[in-house]
Image (cartoon, rainbow, N blue to C red):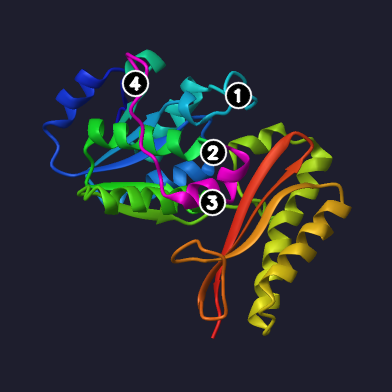
Amino acid sequence: MTLEIIPDIASLRARLAQEKNIAFVPTMGNLHAGHLHLIALARQYADCVVASIFVNPLQFGANEDLDNYPRTLAADCEKLETAGANIVFTPTVSEMYPTAQTMRITPPPIANELCGAARPGHFDGVATVVMKLFNIVQPQVAIFGKKDFQQLFIIRELVRQFNLPIQIIAGETQREESGLALSSRNGYLSASQKLEAQRLYRTLKLIADNVQQGNRDYRAIETQSSQYLTQLGWMVDYISIRSALTLMPANAEDRNLVALAAARQGKTRLIDNIEFSVA
């Protein structure tokens, strides 16, 4: 099966008009095994699997790595073809934003917490480009990874609140043997930083174990965990225990929880999370 590479909206719409069920996997490229897991998952839901590769400027802040974000289109297309994608949509910035995007999706206030606190406007940019991509591709199913748990939550709200006829499927976080979550940004880590980066997931697992053993002092656990990583040289953005259903700070009544973290090794910002339940 040959992967079709389509760079413009009109051609993509014309091609997809003949498809009855479409599963969509939006990406920013620089693909790794985590992305390919989402493609494999998409194949379970539709005959036509569409991926997109678009580095979206709306979701990058002034001091973030838009210009340096790895662009590896040829290698990405080879991986998508091997993984079983049918079509990849590869628009330019001018194709997606032919005029200034002055109309944007404003997510709920949760978008200003967690990753949104350190990246103001980030989720506005995510929600806006995802809405545009949904309108262009018009899939029945869209696949997003759980590693970006807050993003997944916001996209689900987008679909729910705008009554979009799209089923959102969550793909499990793919990890190296060490537990380190696969990420395009892992390539920025030195060998020693990558070794230390394993500690982020181990810390989240310790949090889950602590809570499941009966400790409900969530704020104290967050503070202690943050101090622990800081003492080891991490720059911690946040460690937070939240309701997995609402993303609000966890309280004693919540049973389905998620511990989320964002922290830096050197200049590389890593995020991860772990879902767990309590009796």
Residue 175, placed above or below residue 123: below
Q: Secondary structure at mark 4?
A: helix
**Disc 1 from disc 4: Cα separation:** 20 Å
Picture residue at 68% right of the left edge, 83% below the top: 213
Dot 3 amino acid type: Lys
Picture residue at 18% right of the left edge, 31% below the top: 16
Dot 4 amino acid type: Met
**Mark 2 or mark 1, which is nearer to you?**
1
Q: Secondary structure at mark 1?
A: loop
Residue 187 makes an appearance in the image: yes
**Placement of the N terminus among the 4 image quadrants:** top left
Q: Residues within 10 Å of mark 3 (few under 14, many from 20)?
A: many
Residue 138 shown in magenta: no
**Disc 2 from disc 3: Cα separation:** 13 Å
Q: Residues within 10 Å of mark 2 (few under 14, many from 20)?
A: some
Magenta stretch?
Answer: 96-120
